[in-house]
Image (cartoon, coloured by chain):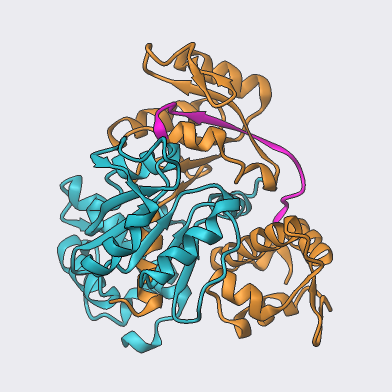
Chain colours: A orange, B cyan
Amino acid sequence: VPRERLTGSVAGRLSHYLHVLTQAKKAGRDSISSQELADYTSVNATQIRRDLSGFGKFGRRGVGYSVDLLSAELRRILGAHSRRDLALVGAGRLGEAIATSDVFVDHGFHVGAVFDADDDRVGGQCGPHVVSAMSELQPYLRQNGVLIGLVAVPGEAAQEVCDALVEGGVRVVVDYSGALLDAPANVLVHNASPAAELLRALYLAGQT
Amino acid sequence: VPRERLTGSVAGRLSHYLHVLTQAKKAGRDSISSQELADYTSVNATQIRRDLSGFGKFGRRGVGYSVDLLSAELRRILGAHSRRDLALVGAGRLGEAIATSDVFVDHGFHVGAVFDADDDRVGGQCGPHVVSAMSELQPYLRQNGVLIGLVAVPGEAAQEVCDALVEGGVRVVVDYSGALLDAPANVLVHNASPAAELLRALYLAGQT
């Protein structure tokens, strides 16, 4: 599957396979079967074999896919091979949860700095970071060439934060507020919607 | 599109459309175009029109989809029309963020109770809930017929929590720990992986 032909759906599935492979690697696994990938991603095994068939012969019958080889190939295809800094806006409960979690680190993503509009939070701690004022956001983004911003503020404040990130040169905004954010066409807004994911999971479980 | 034919990918997209419609409704909108749905979901407009064409004539050329009609139809198809209680395990930062957020409430999901294995947290507050001990988890699940469990504990504790939820009759486990969880075939584990979503978003943004 050449890079230019990946749709959003395929890119999404490949990203989840890579996540499972990364976790399997941490658990000391050398190989993984398409059935295991299916169990851990809720994608059916036939679809998985189809998605991965274009990448050459990683699967060996009865042995499964090599965790290392397949991870490296998926990283190459997704362009996920370098360290990237994230700017986090919002030092509330969710911001703290993000700043102290290692779910991003496993994939080379690092929260580089945390910002908040609340003066009471500025100068305080958020995970390993000292919280900076919003006035420092754009200088930070530009000086460090940061292209990814995480929005962990309430819905009513999210558009303003999004605008500030875009103004600072961010190209990908991940929105945890649930709000619908408007951004220029050259900026991708990912609406991280845990409720939508739960709706899908329930549907698939037949709990409807 | 008959219910039995929805794949996981389609169910996922419909869930995201429903999320956008719910937010649009809150913002006072009566109609929405396929292009707007595309902008807010990173799904292309052609795919959206295809996904929704099976549901009858909700779209009117030049006007867009009726927010109310399309929401109702998507809820019906996804079976998302009733209130559902969630059991949350883990009263740390992420648990608190979940318990105090309204992202689930908009879709009829309510955190009904919060549990934690840490004695220091039991009896304390987590959002509007008093944290219960793990020994109370299974009685709670059974007495209330709760079918959905959220796992907001560190990866190394997640399998044990998953087992306890399954033992209590939960059919859908949403795992925020990043760990790979094993569960019986009749239980769906949704691995909520913000890092995988970010990989996909970055790929789509061409920031690779």
Residue in the picture at 28% in, 38% down? B127
Where in the figure is residue A33, as x and y percent of width and height? 72, 78
Can you see residue A75?
yes
Q: Name the residue at 37% across, 12% down.
A: A120
In the image, residue A141 sits, relative to residue A71, either above or below, namely above
Q: Is residue B200 left or right of residue A74?
A: left
Q: Quadrant of residue A47?
A: bottom right
Q: Does the stretch in magenta take in A137? A: no
Q: Nearer the viewer, residue B67 or A198?
A: A198
Q: Position of residue A181 (x, y in %)?
A: 37, 42
Instruction: For the N terminus of chain B, give its image quadrant.
Output: bottom left
Q: Is residue B1 above or below residue A160?
A: below
Image position of B108 (left or right of A152): left
Residue A79 included in the magenta stretch of the image: yes
Highlighted magenta segment, given as a residue range: A78-93
- For the question of whether residue B1 can be seen, the reply is no
